Image (cartoon, rainbow, N blue to C red):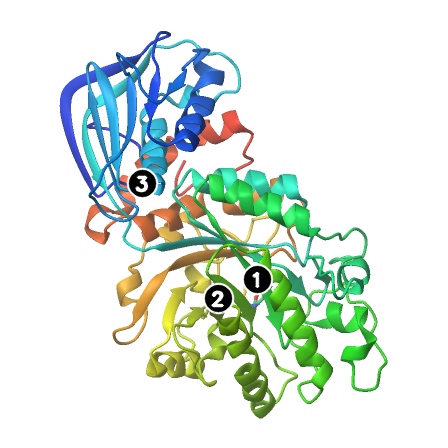
Amino acid sequence: MNDITVVPVPALVEPSNAAYELRADAAIRSDSASVGAYLAEALRPATGFALPVEAAHPRPAIELRLVGHGPDEGYELVVEADGIVVRARREAGLFYGVQTLLQLLPSTVDAATVQDGPWIVPGGRIADEPRFSYRGAMLDVARHFFGVEVVLRFIDALSRYKINVLHLHLSDDQGWRIAIESWPQLARVGGATQVGGAGGGWFSQADYARIVAHAAARHVTVVPEIDMPGHTNAALHACPALNDDGVPPAAYTGVEVGFSTLAVGREETYAFVRDVLAEVAAITPGPWLHIGGDEAQNTSAQDYRTFMARVQPMVTALGKTVIAWHQIGPTEREPGRIAQYWGAKPEPDEDLLAALAQGDRILLSPADRVYLDMRYTAETPIGHDWAGYITTQTAYDWDPDTLLPGPCDIVGIEAPLWTESVATAADIDLLTFPRLPAVAEVAWSPQAARDWAGFRARLAAHGPRWTLRGVAFHPDPTVF
Ligand code: TNX
């Protein structure tokens, strides 16, 4: 395990002189049927081995064991000449141990067809656990719509790096993307457009359930966002009753922000919000509902406070915890809520300071570090630059503990991908890889265990894996 290329770097690695060779007669013995099956399915295509998964096996080759102790999402991985054992207290830990194991094998293990071995795993012991419990990525399916298959592929890719939250930005001015049975026109009318006009689409509740289930099988929790009171043109367009004069605005397919607002003085608005949040909560097993709250530039400060004071308790009443962009900071505080910081230095930010002063928990999405929609350089063919250019090194080289003024309760880190300029799965790949793995390591690994030079060397070894899996990554010259 001397030159291993595992990303995120594990907390502790103790190399030995041993090595294990995976052979055709190997079996997997797993206390978790789902993680055992995941490992077998990951190994079979390239090795061509049968790799039966069994609850008991006389000569186990790879053992995945649930044990009564250990950190929440942590695992221990021991590789010896006669076998491999992963131990964890929870299934999530076994899943992360399996991701590490897959990265210890030769990169050709990621091929879709049978490859030559030998399939050697370097010997030693790894003891690992995450720095932060919330390690997220966000996909904006509102500016451009992406169908279920694209989202499932995104989940597959991010779960390889121990990301455990997928935040879906489900509504914006340009489109409404989740079917709400009590307001059917929201998706049917509000989902018919996207940036540039043509296309659009929405998830049925069955589609959403498929995404949630696929994510859960990879230990990823889905956080749905309904952005309010701004970024709501699609809803206002679809539902005349939400407009004070009863006249809906035209559909919007441009890329400006900050012009739309829900009618804060209208009771229909709160009936709408209550119905939408109730349906979204009912199909979301995770603990969080994201209510947006950013760039409400056409809502007065007083109206914004009034609106948030009514809407936040609705989330709590549904048994969920509020997440909102950090503009929520000055509003009446809902216990336990999370403010998602998306500022870029050196912007002085009163809303953030208000959130900190109230003791909000903080989710870090600093736009000048982890915004996946920022271009790498001026030459990147798509993306924004309002928060600067973000190379892989920029995304990697910072410490979450020293980003904000003063002590605060950081739940984790999330890398958002806004999609004004992102229209295809290949566009998603280009902006996500290799920067998302960089953010994943910031969120998972201890600060003391990581440095840019070491990361760069490890990460470069992942390029061939992405090529084998058809990931159209950016060959960032700071890495490759
Ligand atoms: C700001 S980040 C927005 C989004 C845009 C993004 C583009 C945030 C909470 N709001 O509406 O898509 O910039 O980078």
Q: Residue at left 37%, top 75%? A: 360
Name the quarter showing ligand 1.
bottom right
Left or right, 274 with reference to 468: right
Quadrant of the rendering where the C terminus is positioned: top left
Which one is closest to the eye, mark 2 or mark 3?
2
Please determine whether, in this image, residue 70 is positioned above or below residue 50: below
The percent coordinates of residue 189 (x first, y second) are: 82, 62
| Furthest-front residue in this view | 56
Which one is closest to the eye, mark 3 or mark 1?
1
The percent coordinates of residue 27 (x first, y second) are: 35, 15
Mark 1 and mark 2 residues within 8 Å of each other at the beta carbon: yes
| Furthest-right residue in this view | 247
| Furthest-bottom residue in this view | 302
Residue that badge 1 annotates: 281
Mark-to-mark CA distance, 3 and 1: 27 Å
Query: How many residues crowd around disc 1 within 10 Å: few (fewer than 14), some, or many (20 or more)?
Result: many
Task: Name the N-terminal-most of marks 1 and 2.
Answer: 1
Q: Residue at left 31%, top 58%? A: 398
Q: Residue at left 40%, top 15%? A: 51
Residue that badge 3 annotates: 93
Report the amino acid beneath label 3.
Gly
Residue that badge 2 annotates: 320
Mark-to-mark CA distance, 1 and 2: 7 Å
Say if residue 240 shows up in the picture. yes
Q: Secondary structure at mark 2?
A: loop
Left or right, 10 with reference to 173: left
